[in-house]
């Protein structure tokens, strides 16, 4: 049926019907234009901008209580197994969201949206919790206006830092002003969350992570999801470190090989079941927090730093727990293919529209094109360190053993290593005992030190006299 004929049908029902006009986004625009791999976050004079997405002239439309819209499901070139990355689909969803938000200042306005679509609206913009009814191609939503307002404040893509407004600090431009954000929930319940499953290799990391968050004077809860592989003794130590423990059933990746390191990484999806909280910031247990990051709870789902190409890094990310989102993710895990067979690849296909946090919030300990420690310094401005490569507790405290393997040199940093052990030193002795070295771990370090010495690696870290009492002396 032609659009004009549809409008006449609505008018025939005795309703006051108005067509909303807007220019379509240019056909030469691509998703990569809105989600570039890299942006200049530290530009001194002009904050990075996103290409425009045309919007209607909202002042031309009066008050209304119903929006009916046909939503496209994506372009014909969509790759099987990938999430939808279609600029016109994004435009239609943003037009509808902005129409609702510009309909008035009343937070209790009674506006319904009827989406006509095989796939429904974008879950990143319209919450499945706001779905009133779904039948066939009809999806009826009553959106939470306050939450939707925050979504339209966001830049149209990760081509710009989320709500980044330049201000001066000691003569330097920074982009972490949160002045335009407001709480979408009265008295929100919020928590930092991590997860341990399948083995106890990261128990030490989770203990140190909790201590680093507490030392940052955070006011938020700490919640740790653990499966049955985490022993009672370890759970008691984790609780003593500050975590509230929640036992979960782990989730197997449908694509990872049996016994692979990422076989059970889809267990991370359980964080959406933490319905006691309005927002959570998930943090991998191989990070430490250096500065208080509580203010980042103001952001909406899904917020993270950029990782590679169009993708975000799931090591630190803000999500809004929701049982219906969890059920949708569980369903999509069999249709969306992860590029790395793990949670990060999957989540990037499930949430193609995301918000870019500054990279200093999740500083990835990786250095490209550098080969000596003077160039492997951690900037003083970072909020956290994400320990890629061999973890600090898997090395001696005297030095970062990533220096002993050429293919790991890019992960090596004495300054980052030292910052982790600083947190360790402030912990009670009974918690430090969970960061010990087994004989096999110690033997591995010694083996690679010998190989580094035999190869006369230029960093010469193999010459360091180890004083770490955790070593097993021969």
Image (cartoon, grey):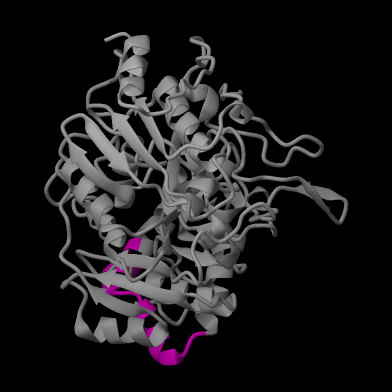
Percent position of residue 313, x then y: 44, 46
For image coordinates 47% across by 37% down, the residue present is 64
Q: Residue furthest left?
A: 258
Residue 442 among those drawn in magenta? yes
Residue 296 among those drawn in magenta? no
Q: Looking at the image, can residue 467 be seen?
A: no
The front one of 49 and 132 is 132
Apparent side of residue 43 relative to residue 230 in the rendered image (left or right): right
In the picture, the quarter occupied by the N terminus is: top left
Percent position of residue 442, x then y: 34, 69
For image coordinates 43% across by 20% down, the residue present is 88
Percent position of residue 379, x then y: 68, 55
Q: Residue furthest front?
A: 14
Percent position of residue 51, x then y: 61, 23
Q: Quadrant of residue 66?
A: top left
For image coordinates 62% across by 54% down, the residue present is 181
The front one of 64 and 185 is 64
Apparent side of residue 260 relative to residue 181 in the rendered image (left or right): left
In the picture, the quarter occupied by the C terminus is: bottom left
Q: Quadrant of residue 178?
A: bottom right
For image coordinates 24% across by 53% down, the residue present is 324
Apparent side of residue 241 relative to residue 199 in the rendered image (left or right): right
Q: Quadrant of residue 139?
A: top left
Magenta: main secondary structure equals helix
Q: Total marks drawn?
A: 0
Please say if 458 is above or below 184: above
The front one of 139 and 124 is 139
Q: Which residues are magenta?
A: 427-444
Please say if 5 is above or below 409: above
Please say if 60 is above or below 25: below
Q: Looking at the image, can residue 125 be seen?
A: yes
């Amino acid at each position: 049926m032609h659009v004009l004929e549809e409008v006449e049908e609505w008018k025939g029902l005795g309703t006051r019907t108005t067509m909303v006009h807007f220019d379509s986004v240019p056909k030469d625009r691509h998703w990569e234009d809105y989600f570039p791999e890299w942006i200049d976050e530290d530009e001194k004079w002009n904050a990075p901008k996103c290409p425009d997405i045309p919007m209607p002239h909202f002042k031309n439309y009066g008050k209304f209580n119903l929006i009916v819209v046909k939503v496209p499901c994506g372009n014909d070139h969509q790759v099987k197994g990938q999430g939808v990355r279609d600029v016109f689909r994004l435009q239609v969803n943003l037009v509808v969201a902005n129409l609702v938000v510009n309909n008035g200042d009343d937070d209790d306005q009674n506006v319904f949206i009827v989406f006509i679509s095989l796939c429904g609206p974008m879950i990143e913009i319209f919450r499945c919790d706001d779905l009133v009814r779904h039948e066939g191609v009809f999806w009826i939503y009553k959106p939470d206006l306050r939450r939707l307002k925050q979504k339209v404040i966001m830049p149209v893509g990760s081509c710009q830092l989320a709500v980044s407004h330049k201000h001066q600090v000691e003569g330097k431009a920074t982009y972490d002003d949160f002045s335009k954000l407001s709480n979408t929930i009265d008295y929100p319940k919020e928590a930092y969350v991590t997860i341990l499953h399948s083995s106890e290799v990261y128990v030490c990391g989770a203990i140190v992570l909790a201590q680093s968050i507490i030392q940052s004077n955070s006011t938020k809860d700490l919640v740790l999801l653990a499966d049955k592989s985490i022993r009672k003794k370890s759970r008691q130590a984790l609780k003593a470190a500050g975590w509230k423990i929640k036992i979960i059933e782990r989730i197997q990746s449908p694509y990872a090989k049996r016994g692979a390191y990422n076989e059970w990484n889809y267990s991370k999806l359980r964080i959406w079941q933490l319905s006691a909280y309005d927002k959570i910031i998930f943090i991998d247990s191989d990070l430490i927090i250096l500065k208080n990051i509580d203010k980042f709870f103001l952001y909406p789902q899904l917020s993270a730093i950029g990782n590679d190409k169009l993708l975000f890094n799931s090591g630190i990310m803000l999500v809004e727990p929701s049982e219906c989102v969890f059920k949708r993710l569980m369903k999509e895990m069999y249709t969306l293919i992860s590029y790395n067979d793990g949670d990060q690849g999957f989540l990037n296909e499930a949430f193609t529209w995301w918000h870019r946090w500054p990279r200093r919030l999740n500083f990835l300990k990786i250095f490209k094109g550098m080969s000596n420690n003077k160039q492997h310094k951690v900037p003083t401005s970072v909020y956290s360190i994400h320990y890629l490569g061999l973890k600090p507790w898997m090395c001696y405290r005297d030095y970062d053993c990533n220096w002993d393997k050429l293919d790991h040199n890019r992960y090596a940093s004495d300054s980052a290593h030292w910052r982790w052990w600083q947190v360790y030193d402030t912990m009670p002795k009974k918690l430090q005992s969970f960061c010990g070295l087994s004989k096999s771990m110690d033997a591995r370090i010694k083996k690679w030190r010998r190989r580094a010495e035999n190869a006369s690696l230029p960093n010469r870290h193999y010459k360091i006299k180890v004083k770490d009492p955790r070593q097993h002396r021969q």
